[in-house]
Amino acid sequence: MRFICNLCSSLFPSLEGGGSQRERELGIDASTRFATLGTIKASVFWLLVASLLGLISSIKLHSPSYLAEFSCLSYGKVYPAFWNVLVYGWLFNAGLACVCWISARLAGRPIGNSYLLTIAGGAWNFAVIVGLVGILVGDQRPFRLLEFPSYAAPLLFVSFLGMGIWILLAFKARAYRSTFVSQWYVLAAVFSFVWIYMIAQVMIFLVPAQGVFQSVVASWFFGNLSGLVIAPLAFATLYYLIPKTLGQHIVGYRQSGIAFWTWLAASSCSGLAALVNGPFPAWVASVGVIASFALFLPVSIFGMQFVSSLLSSFSKIWDSLSARFVAYSVVAFLVASLLIVFGSLRGPQETLQFTQFENGLRFLFLAGFGGMAFMGGSYFILPRLLNKELPSSGLIDVQFWIQGLGIFVIAASLISAGSAHGALLNGSEVDTVQALASVQPYFFIATLGFVFFLSGSLMYAVSFFWMLLSSRSEKEKSAELLKSAPELEYTPS
C-alpha cells in the first residue's frame, strides 16, 4: 500500500509554494507527466530485455551449444530479436520520451491531448511485443530491422503516427513563433520514419520490387533508420541538454542550419555504401560512398559545436549527472561517425565487409551515441517531472562507468574482430574455420562487455523505480526544489 501511495504522489504531486517563474514549467510538466513516465518505463523494460538478448547472442558466437535445447533461442532468432528490441523497444521509447517532453517545454505552454500520446505509446509497445514473439516463434522476415512479422508492422506504423501527430500538435501550439534547433530534428525524425517505413514495407513486402532492388531498399532503410530517425532524436536531446546542464549557449549555434540540412542530405543515401561489391549497378553503391564521405561536413560542425561547448565548461560536466552522459554521447558520435565514413570507402570494405565490424560500429552509434544521450535526458527530465531529487548519485555514477565501459568493450571487440577476420579471409593461406577460431577471443571479450552493459541496465532500472516509488521528503514537497538541485533549470535573463 505504501508503494502505491508513493507512486500516486509521484504521478500527481501536490506541491507547496512556487512563484510565477515556476508556474508555467509545472503546468507544462503536468500536461505530459503520465505519458512521458509511461514511455520511460517502457524504455527501461526494453533495455533490460535487449541487454539479456544481446548477452545470449554474444555467448552463442563462441559457445554455439549454449541454450541449444530451446529452439526459440537459436542464434538466428536471438540475434535479430536483440537488434529490433534495442532499436524499436529501447531507443525509440527513450528517444520519444525525451523529445516529447522537450517539445512541450519548447512550446512554452501546457500541451493537451496527452491521452493520444499515452494510447499511441501503449500501442507501440504492444506492437514491439507482438514483433518480438513473432521473431522468436519463427515468423521473422529476412531484412535487417524489418524482421518483425507482417502482422506487427501495421500496428507499429499506426502507433507511431499517433505519437507523431501529438508532436506536430505540440509544435503548432507553441507560444513562440521562432523555432529551436531541437524542434527541427524532432520534426525531421517524425517525418523521416513515416516516410522510410512506409516505403520499405510497400516496396519490399506489399508490392515487392523486382530483382535485387529489394536489397537496395532494405539497405537504404537500414541506413536511414539510424541516420534520419535515431540520430535526429539524439541531436534534439543534445541541443537541449548542453545549454541546460552547462548553463551556456551552444558554441557556433549559427551554423546549426548548415549541419541540419547537410546531415539529412548525406544520411539519406549513406546506407547504400553497404552495397559495394554486390550484384548491383555500380552507381548505386557509389552514391552511398559519396554520401557517406559527405558526412564529414555536418560531423565537423557537430564536433565543433558540442566539443567546444563541453570544453568551455569542462568542470561542470562532473557536477551534473546528465552532462556526463551527454559528454559520452558526443565522443561516441564523433568516433562512430568517422569510422562510418572511412569504413564506407571501397578500399576498407574489401577487408571489412561481411564481418562483425559493422555490428560493432552500429552498436557504438546506436547505444553509445543515442542510448547515452537518452539516458542523460531521462536523468534530467525525471527530477522535473516528479519534483524529486535523484535517489542515489553514487549508484548513477557507477552505472555511468559500468554501462559506458560495456558499450566501449562491445564496440571495440567487435570492430577489432571484424578487422582481424577480414584480413584473414582476404589471405589465401587460412581457411574459414581457422579464421573464425582466431577471432574467438574477441567474442569472449564482447560477452564480458555485455555483462557490463546488462549490469548498468539493471542499475538504471533500480534508479528509476527507486525514484518513482520512494516517499516524498519535506524538501521535495516544495515547488522551488529545483533551485537547489544539482542541475538547474537555466532560463534567459
Image: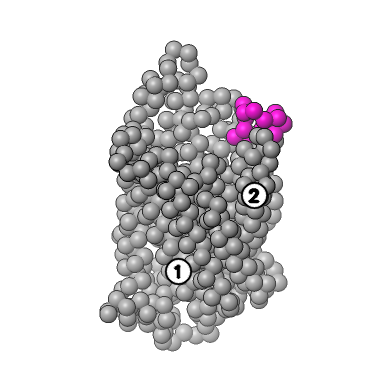
Residue ID at (56%, 24%) = 350
Residue 33, relative to residue 408: is it above or below? below
Q: Main secondary structure of the magenta part?
A: helix
Residue 174, relative to residue 181: is it above or below? below
Residue 292 at x, y percent in the picture: 63, 38
Left or right of residue 300: residue 387: left
Q: Which mark is residue 38?
A: 1
Screen quadrant of the N terminus? bottom left
Tell me how far mark 1 sits from mark 2, CA to CA. Answer: 33 Å
Q: Is residue 406 visible?
A: no
Q: Which mark is residue 395?
A: none
**Crowding near the residue tagged with mark 2, few <14, some 14–19, many ≥20 C-alpha atoms within 10 Å:** few
Q: Amino acid at mark 2?
A: Leu
Residue 422, relative to residue 152: is it above or below? above
Residue ID at (33%, 34%) = 64
Q: For mark 2, what is the residue? A: 206
Left or right of residue 10: residue 236: right
Residue ID at (56%, 64%) = 159
**Crowding near the residue tagged with mark 1, few <14, some 14–19, many ≥20 C-alpha atoms within 10 Å:** some
Q: Amino acid at mark 1?
A: Gly
Is 467 within the magenta? Answer: no
Which span is picked out in magenta? 271-286
Q: Secondary structure at mark 1?
A: helix
Q: How many marks?
A: 2
Q: Secondary structure at mark 2?
A: helix
* Residue lying farthest to the left in this orientation: 1
Please identify, in this view, whether the residue under mark 1 or under mark 2 is nearer the observer.
2
Q: Quadrant of residue 62?
A: top left
